[in-house]
Image (spheres, grey):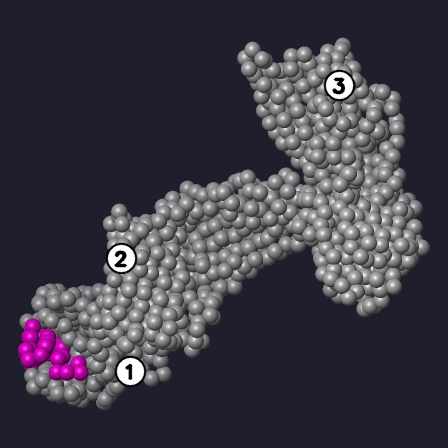
Amino acid sequence: VLDECVDPLVSSLYANSFLASSRYNFLYSANFAKLYGYSGWSPSPRDRQPWLQIDLKRKYRIQAIATQGTFNSYDWVTKYTLLYGDRPDSWTPYVMKGGNSTMPGNWNYHQVKRNVFHYAFTAKHIRLLPLGWNTENGGKIGVRLEVFGCAYDSYVMQMNGDDSVAFMFPGKRFRTLQDHFAVNFKTLEQDGLLLHSEGVQGDILSLELRKGRLVLTIGLGSSTVNQVDGRTTMTVGNILDDQHWHYVTIKRYGRQVNFTVDAHTETAISKGDFTYIDLDTQMYVGGVIEPNVPHLPEVPNFRGCLENVFINGINVINMKKMHYACRDILWKPMTFAGPNNYLQVPGFFRKPRMFVKFKFRSWDYTGLLMFTRFADDLGALELGLSEGQVNVTLFQPGKKKLQFAAGYRLNDGFWHTVDVAARDNLLSITIDEEEGSPLKITNPFTVRTGDRYFFGGCPKTNNTIRKCETKLNHFHGCMQQIFIDNEPVDIDIILQRRWGRYAELLLGTCGITDRCTPNPCEHEGRCIQSWDDFICLCENTGYKGEVCHMSDKAWTIVMHDRIDGIKVTGSTVDRPYIGDVNYWNASWDDVTALANTSMYCEQWIDYSCYKSRILNTPNGRPYSFWIGRNNESHEYWGGAFPESGKCGCAINQTCTDARFHCNCDADYRQWYSDKGYLMWKDHLPVRKVVVGDTNRTGSKAHISLGPLRCHGDRSIWNTISFTKPTYIEFPTFRPGSTVDISFHFKTYRPHGVFLENSDDWLRNFIRIELNTTQNLVFIFMVGDGILNVTLRSPVPLNDNEWHFVQAELNVKLARIKVDYQPWAVRRFPGQTFVTMEFTHPLLVGTSPANRTLWPFLGCLRGLRMNGVTLDLEGKANEEQGIRRNCTGQCLNATIPCRNAAQCIEGYAAYTCDCGNTAFDGFYCHKDIGAYFEIGSWLRYNIRKKPTTNEEWWANWLDPHYHNFSLGYNDTSDEIEFSFSTFQTPAVLLYISSFVQDYMAVILKKDGTLDMRYRLGLITHKYQLSFRNLADGYPHYVNITRHNRTIRTQVLWELVAVDVHTVTPLSLSLTPSEVGDIDYEIQRHNSPGLVGCISGVRYNIYAPLKTLFRPNETEPPVTVQGFVSESNCGAFPPVHGYVPWEADHWFTSIGETTYPRSLQYMLQFNVLDTSVQGCYGNAEHLSLTSDVWAGPAVPLPTSSSYWTSFEMDGCLITICGCIRNDTSGL
């Protein structure tokens, strides 16, 4: 039936059904506010509280509302509140899920925004209150609307507490398997019996209002013999004594019971083993009129209105032919809902007695209830709500103010009565009409009433005469039944005659809502609320977050032998104190494995100092550091970012001396400390602590290291990589009102959408994306337009490192964070609501069909949605571009990066980093060589000064970490190059030192190749090749040293030798004088190399590449003589076939245009003959016998030849053999 209840109700109404607080002009009158009309309603700009009201002429069941802006304008409402009621002066605010009453409006003038109510309500009058509107381009409030529903027959009766209705069951028997009861009610009372019936076998059905909550007691039978208590109690709702209609349904099938009040449903299984309910002959409605009947509850009868009481399809009120009216209360409530709300009413001036009485209800702890200033400057009286009590403050000029409090827990949301009476020297206050115990105060003071009273707050005014002054906040809640000097305050008359004033009030309604019912705090968290907000207390729940939604951590803690601290004195940089950390009950491998497999780890470290420096910041070498998991030293301390070279105080900008990055670096003669958590998991646990500055007079340090604390298990994380623009589909995400998302990602791309879920019209969606290299964005539309929260990272996020993302969205806020950076938070106003009702599947990645979103290319792992891990690996599909594990194009590259170049993963593509190679080109395949004429040489400076003892010591502690500062590695070396020459002798490569140690590669006079090491007084000689290598052909040389073992290779010859180490100063090709050169070297250095040398690399240094491809303004290269770039005839790589879909240079399939004239050079060798060389033109790269030209060239005997050249940026390589008949290639 409800699905058919969608008739338009406004479009057929006449103009007299529309009423508004004001209008902009005649063309914007209220009767123009019909959907799809050619105008619209707009209020006057001076109207501070505009409203639009519609009289539907009869009562309807209302299901939805739709709005538009004013036709062809910039006028539309972005959010509004909807009131409804049976009378035009008594209103009920529509409250959405979560206790919010703000509804989303429009984003332009023409599109229709439809809001479907989460529960249907009945009303004859509708009032719309605009709360926000477009202000751009001169926009203002503009409304066109339609309401959808169907006719509703209302049968009501008034219950006064001393009457009831007895409904006789048909056949005077009630035995059923399933039931459907329904009743609508409204009341001002907290307690009252609505329905009641019992059976002789212990069956019972009782519905009562108890302290503003509905309590259902149902029992399908009890047995004293078998000791079975079949009664089940269910409680739903709160503060239902608000004089608004509430809709109650009870549905039962067997033992299953659904109990619904408005939109809140509770489900329970009835106790016992019975499925039928057996009741006596009648059911009481509204109370019991036979008090002597046994077993009836001792609760008061219901006082209020009942409507359409249905018992299994029978309307009891209609059957009894009772068509009574529901008499609403005379006293109209009002809602104090704004930040500057107040009500000012007149009083009788200069009376010797004062009487003030009113009712209020609120959730707030503090707020001004009433303020009045006495006549003749005799003082003032203030009533305020403070910590749930009514505080009474009496101000007297020249005297100390009098203060006392009355009541207890009056901010519980229920109505409370305050009655104040005052005369000279006596003031009494009564709370909730407890006449027997009024609170009285007797002090000397004089009362002469003033002419005005302020309720709820003080107006902002500069008038100092009879001004309302208070330090209390504005009151937020409801008031009614205000009496001044025993006279009731009729708000309508006072405001009509302008005897009073008000601001930010809702008249005729109490808009209080219970935000804690149903409890928004998950996992049994405790809810505490104010007027427009709530807080969840998550203690002892095992969860955390705004609504106790995120799982708390179960920590694994590993203790060690340094918990009590380390006292250090007498240490120096050259001889530091090294404190080993031994973990208890676990081996080092066990502790490392724990940190490696955990999601998060931390370890507290505290360096307390007395004239003992840590880092010698900002530019000095560190005195103290710690060594982590991989035996690497780290110079950052607790609370600082990894490898920042700082302490936590520098991050927080709280250092004792701002010139330094640590408190201890100020080097004061008093105790300071630098402390905090080390949280970079890949560096933990701490293995050693090194302290090096405690040898000066009075210098000392104390190091405290906390246990290793880890939580989470990342072994269950599954990982995939996106290598094409594609997506993974999961079932629709149904989060309810709260969502938390977490995942890890890494990528090189600056943009990409990680995940998205939406409805059919994209009116309800969530999306997380990388918007720029440093912006991570959480975008959503969940009820109040498109919003986002953006985290701006100080470092790029597309660095191809793993980053951990967390996002959360609930009725209070949306927030997102990455790694250890602070949360980016967007808090919502108190009247915000959240609706996450998605219909489309959850997409991880982005569909290629969506051209408006950037696809994600990279790796994802550990995706969790509301605590549930999604199986990413189960969706892997190589054809679609989804791979298991984090693998992209580098793993199976069609053309791998050459010459030990690093492959930079782009997932859909890749690039080659040639930085640490001696080669160039897209695949680092292009050789960089140089032709040396006689007397020429090249020198590359590695270091400008000798290595200090401190550097040696630091390098001994951690040879890997300090390699960059030393410029070399004393445990390993790698040298490679190729050369070609006809001239001998020659020194091909020479590495010198600041002393007489050196290493050299020499081409001797007979063409053989030697290597010379000199360490101290001894020169080591090793012959690398026994062949004559001065034959004009390129020859490849590789020398690799690890500790004392050297392996050399010249073409296919492999030799292993044993040496010591040498400290390099410079690297020279065909060296000149560098200090005192050994005589044996000088003997082979004249006239020097005449020929080519290429691909030269010593560890990370490539001298020829630095010369010809410099990346700095002053490269450390010196050249003497004529040195020109050449490939030296080095063997180029032969690339395999590349399919067009994997070819980075492919443009299209079709006709290929070649250059009309291609100049090339062929150099080749044949066996037992002489053949002419070629220097000419070829059109399609075909080489046949008719293109030869030029003189005959005698060549050495060989059957192989090769050549290479460039065409349009591509490397062309030709190789093969020549047939003796020269008929082809």
Q: Is residue 486 visible?
A: yes
Q: Is residue 351 left or right of residue 246?
A: right
Q: Given contact means CB atoms under 8 Å apart, are the residues at marks 1 and 2 in contact?
A: no
Q: Which mark is residue 283?
A: 3
Q: Residue at x 81, y 43 (%)?
A: 91
Q: Quadrant of the N terminus?
A: top right
Q: Which residue is mark 1?
A: 1116
Residue shown at the point (35%, 80%) measured from the top left: 1112
Left or right of 795? Residue 1005 is: left
Hey, what amino acid is under mark 3?
Answer: Met
Q: Secondary structure at mark 3?
A: strand
**Where's residue 1072, x and y in %?**
17, 87
Q: Which quarter of the image is occupied by the C terminus?
A: bottom left
Of the residues under marks 2 and 3, which one precedes in the sequence?
3
> What residue is disc 2 on?
581
**What amino acid type is highlighted by mark number 1?**
Pro
Mark with earlier residue (3, 1): 3
Q: Bin the neighbour count of mark 1 within 10 Å (Cα to Cα): few under 14, some 14-19, many 20 and up.
A: some
Is 1002 covered by the magenta stretch?
A: yes
**In which image quadrant can residue 760 be found?**
top right
Find the magenta span and give its range.
993-1022
Above or below for 693 versus 23: below
Residue mark closest to the camera, 3 vs 1: 3
* Above/below status of 79 relative to 691: above
Amino acid type, mark 2: Val
